[in-house]
Image (cartoon, rainbow, N blue to C red):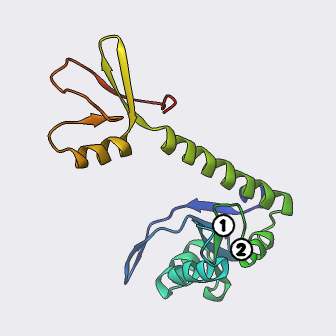
Amino acid sequence: MLEKRGYEVRVQPIIQTDAGIRKPNILAIIPGVSATVMDVTIITDSLDLRTSHELKRQYYDTQSIHEYASRHAGCADSEVEFSSVTFNWLGALCKQSAKALLGLGLSKNNLKLLSISIVERGYQTWQYTRKATVRYRESSTDIVASRTLSKRCHRANQDQDVVLGRPAHSHLGSEWMFSPIVSL
């Protein structure tokens, strides 16, 4: 999106600082004019968007990163800006992040698309982790259980592996594989 608006974009540049290596997600440069250092963060809905935005911005707003950005952009140190792109997992965007993105030339529709993308990707991640299971095949019968349930049962009964409350004997020739969960 930023390249279409005339920016030279560097993704995750490695910047050596006094505090160690920093890797902001985006360094957007207009050569000879300005540079904007941005880092994306997605937080839970129980955290404050403004506070999270400011903490992330302060994390990157250091003298070493100012020098790096101004040197690579060929601009004055005063023309380097810092922001974060702070969303919560419900797709809400921090007001300060929205102002920074709009200042870079993105439209409100672009921000809506980013928000929708955050929600979709979060849902896909939730589905993936919810469905991730270990399947144990025993001859013609498949025994399926979630890894979490299997670990809880194993802790409860150290003598044998328990899958869905049934003993699963390891001496049976079987294969392990990851598969989506079948209804439990």
Label 2, residues with CA under 10 Å away: few <14, some 14-19, many ≥20: some
- What residue does disc 2 label? 94
Q: Where residue 146 sits: x, y (%)?
A: 40, 39
Q: Nearer the viewer, residue 66 or 96?
A: 96
Q: Where residue 32 sits: x, y (%)?
A: 68, 75
Disc 2 residue type (three-letter): Cys
Which residue corresponds to the image point at 37% horizontal and 84% vertical from the top-left?
18
Number of numbered discs visible in the structure rendering: 2
Which residue corresponds to the image point at 50% horizontal and 87% vertical from the top-left?
63
Marks 1 and 2, how far apart in space?
6 Å
Q: Which mark is residue 151?
A: none
| Vertical comparison of 166 with 90: above or below | above
Residue farthest toward the top in the current orientation of the protein: 140
**Residue 20 relative to residue 7: left or right:** left
Whether residue 9 is visible: yes
Disc 1 residue type (three-letter): Phe
Q: Nearer the viewer, residue 56 or 29?
A: 56
- Give the quadrant of residue 35: bottom right
- What residue does disc 1 label? 87
| Vertical comparison of 58 with 102: above or below | below
Q: Where residue 71 sits: x, y (%)?
A: 55, 77
**Residue 137 relative to residue 74: left or right:** left
For the residue labelled by badge 1, is the local secondary structure a helix, a strand or a loop?
Answer: strand
- Give the quadrant of residue 124: top right
Query: Do the CB atoms of the residues marked 1 and 2 lie less than 8 Å apart?
Result: yes
**Quadrant occupied by the N terminus:** bottom right
Label 1, residues with CA under 10 Å away: few <14, some 14-19, many ≥20: many
- Give the quadrant of residue 158: top left
Specify which label sits upstream in the sequence, 1 or 2: 1
Which residue corresponds to the image point at 51% horizontal and 81% vertical from the top-left?
59
Q: Where residue 117 sits: x, y (%)?
A: 70, 51
| Vertical comparison of 53 with 7: above or below | below
